[in-house]
Image: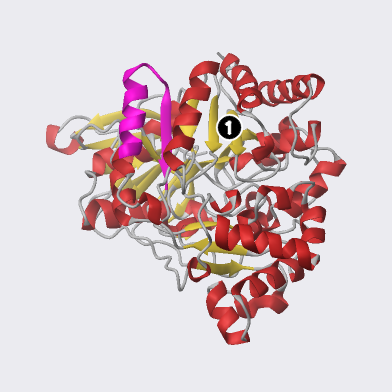
Amino acid sequence: MEDLVVRDADVVDGTGADSYRADVLIDGGRIVAIVKEAAAAGCQRPKATRELDAEGLVLSPGFIDMHAHSDLALLRDPGHSAKAAQGVTLEVLGQDGLSYAPVDDRTLDEVRRAIAGWNGPGDDIDFDWRSVGEYLDRLDRGIAVNAAYLIPQGTVRALAVGWEDRPATPRELDRMRQLVAEGLEQGAVGLSSGLTYTPGMYAENTELTELCRVVAGYGGYYCPHHRSYGAGALEAYAEMVELTGKAGCALHLAHATMNFGVNEGRAPELLALLDEALDGGADISLDTYPYTPGCTTLAALLPSWASEGGPAEILRRLADDETAERIRHDLEVTGADGCHGVPVDWSTIEISGVTDPALGEFVGRTVRQSSALRGEAPWTTARRLLLDDSLGPTILQHVGHEENVRTIMRHRVHTGGSDGILHGAKPHPRAYGTFPHYLGHYVRELGILPLEECVAHLTGRPAARLRLPDRGLVREGYRADLVLFDPRTVAAGSTYEAPRTLPTGIPHVLIDGRFVIEDGRRTDILAGRAVRRTPL
């Protein structure tokens, strides 16, 4: 690990303060000196084995992706250019209440099937872990970027209760408390939920409150994908604020959007709700991605009653004509809870990926477009895909509103999260473009945020939520997880038509003082490791 001086950089330090020009000396994986206005002052400039001329470039802390779905992608492709090329130096995994630890043999198989649309079936992965600590140890063998982990409440419930829609017994609740405590002791930073996904959605608020009390005792935070982002969204946000207030637990709202037609223009109402809680002393933060469409699995839209019992039961119900008709009615007429209480509009549901290559013709088309080509009803097409691909299809859901996106990203507790699903032939462009899209489109082109403030949203603020004592800022003694970008050219390359295109204007990314991106190219260095919870 050689020493390095970054010469004549425009430092944006992650605090939101004005930028300044400086030489930054890195040694032993840490920032050891920052000499401001070195050239102009005529003082002794720091020297190192290697120098990097950063004239015209911004040096900032590495970006922290507060909502990532790279749980298997990091193991499958340790190079991980999708995130490294964006300047991401830390991702938070275990999102939306479903991931791969803690598990036993039964629940591992069930979870793999349930979220195959997020991460693929995992047939190419050696699942040689079962506990949270063992999963973090697996990451420590070498990955491109750092990773923190949230304990997934749905996975915990599957392990202690199963996939049934019923309250947990006292003994099962004790088991869940134990599993959450063990995961936190082993290094997890908090707890996530997917309250429109099974089996997490079957948990009553009393159960969630008890688990959040455990999280609070360890200084972690609760990150819910709450019960609705459509009809009843504001009520669902308020529910999480009240729940965590009772538990005394910090709250981080996952992909805090206001989607569907019923919420157009209503972002100020959400922010007023949060401001009232914050002014009352609540510890709240949120993340968003800078795009309007959402992304999930096709199976996630189904009503909760149709998902009870797990993936095998879902497929059994879909195969039964009478039950399938009930599902259709809930989706198209009533508004299924899996679709956030809003009747589904099949013209907004675009298939972005399938696990069976034989179904590739559906990718890139909406369900309505494919059904028209086949001369059948949209539900017939959707049902066929779910059955033929064993619940594997991933979707883009075109239901967002640009004014809501812009309003929420300005908020004082906002952070950035890609919610990036890397699996599928045509993933959401946010997986490859979130962070340069913030900097290029919303900072440079639209002026929605000043550069210094935006960088704080993507670095210092999320590091504070994660309670990281030496990351997220350009400061002496801090880890040298850094990104150099050109503010005049930085931009997302990914589009809806070409979603895997890498960004431009980010020539260098360092983790632990080592180049993972150098001159715009991925190196072979795997400098990332699991970032474990900081003890109280």
The chosen color scheme is: secondary structure
User: With 495 as the anchor, is 356 left or right in this view?
Assistant: right
Residue under the image location 81 percent in, 65 percent down: 320
Residue under the image location 28 percent in, 57 percent down: 441
Pinpoint residue 501: horizontal percent, then vertical percent.
Answer: 46, 67
Tell me where residue 460 sits by quadrant: top left
Task: Please determine whether, in this image, residue 344 is positioned above or below residue 18.
Answer: below
Tell me, yes or no, whether the highlighted magenta stretch contains residue 292: no
User: With 461 as the anchor, is 57 left or right in this view?
Assistant: left
User: With 412 as the anchor, is 239 left or right in this view?
Assistant: right
Which residues make up the magenta segment? 269-288
Pinpoint residue 464: horizontal percent, then vertical percent.
Answer: 42, 26
Is residue 140 at least partly visible in the picture?
no
Q: Which residue is mark 1?
A: 531
Task: Please determine whether, in this image, residue 377 is positioned above or below residue 285.
Answer: below
User: With 220 as the anchor, is 12 left or right in this view?
Assistant: left
Is residue 252 at least partly visible in the picture?
yes
Tell me where residue 372 sits by quadrant: bottom right
- Type of residue at label 1? Val
Task: Please determine whether, in this image, residue 501 is positioned above or below residue 231.
Answer: below
Tell me, yes or no, whether the highlighted magenta stretch contains residue 287: yes
In the foreground, 262 or 30: 262
Residue under the image location 25 percent in, 30 percent down: 35
Pinpoint residue 63: horizontal percent, then vertical percent.
Answer: 42, 42
Q: Quadrant of the C terminus?
A: top right
